[in-house]
Image: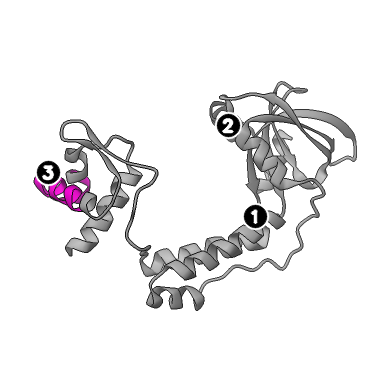
Amino acid sequence: MSRIFRLHQLLQTIRNETPPVTAERLAMVMEVSVRTIHRDVATLRQLGAGIDGAAGYGFTLGDDVSVPPLSFGNDELEALVLGLREVEEIGDTVLSGAARQALTKLKARLPESQSKRLRHAVLTAKHFRKRPEILVDVAAIRQATWEEKEIGFNYRDAQGVSTARQVRPLSITYFEHNTCLISWCLLRKNTRVFRLDRMADLLVTETSFRPNRVALLHRAIEHIRATPFSGGEQGKAKAVT
């Protein structure tokens, strides 16, 4: 392993591990000596990397870390292109635009050889079956989910019956044919999955359920997994809606 590659890998390992990560843990993951870890950390600091911590405590990357130019393996580049192209296809207007912008930024930041590979990637994603039209603001739902604010909307079920709902939004899931919101429904007092194309009259409230989203989401996923269903992912979503 070249030293430049090892330094890059060390930054990635510190970033991926739960901070603070000890030199012993880094040495085990990277299969080098603890002494090598301390020497490489010192080198990275000299190059401008904001690595906090010390021997016996552990290391943490600061938010203002100065890192070397982006570098990815060939398969990593293909995975990035495929993932972002998929978001372009299935995401809402805001998310699709963000995916295109992310690809543009990657092309500008990568070394020329890798930028060329990104421009001419052999993988892409296309969907020829039209997804149901979504009339509510998906970006607003995403923001409410991050901010842990309850939302209200009118919901039309598979039989066409409409009900007013107020929920705690937990996660948006993109299935093959439609997009669903995993939530805690205050009306049903339980986990519910709602198709976004059946929502109308979205209202983001100022009622906060912070800091419970992560815990509620874990419970919701357990509930969905335990729910009997048939017909694949769509059947599972239907079973808990």
Q: Is residue 225 above or below residue 38?
A: above
Residue at mark 2 to residue at mark 3: CA–CA distance = 39 Å
Would you say the magenta stretch is mainly helix, strand or loop? helix
Give the percent coordinates (x, y) of residue 25: 21, 39
Q: Is residue 55 left or right of residue 141?
A: left
User: Which residue: 72% across, 68% down?
Assistant: 128
User: Which residue: 41% across, 63% down?
Assistant: 76
Q: Amino acid at mark 1?
A: Leu
Residue 1 appears in the picture as rendered = no
Residue nearer the viewer, 159 or 30: 30
Give the percent coordinates (x, y) of residue 186: 74, 23
Which portion, as a residue range, is magenta?
Answer: 28-43
Q: Nearer the viewer, mark 2 or mark 1?
A: 1
Q: Which residue is mark 1?
A: 95
Q: Amino acid at mark 3?
A: Val
In primary-sequence order, the first of circles 2 and 3 is 3
Q: Which residue is mark 3?
A: 34
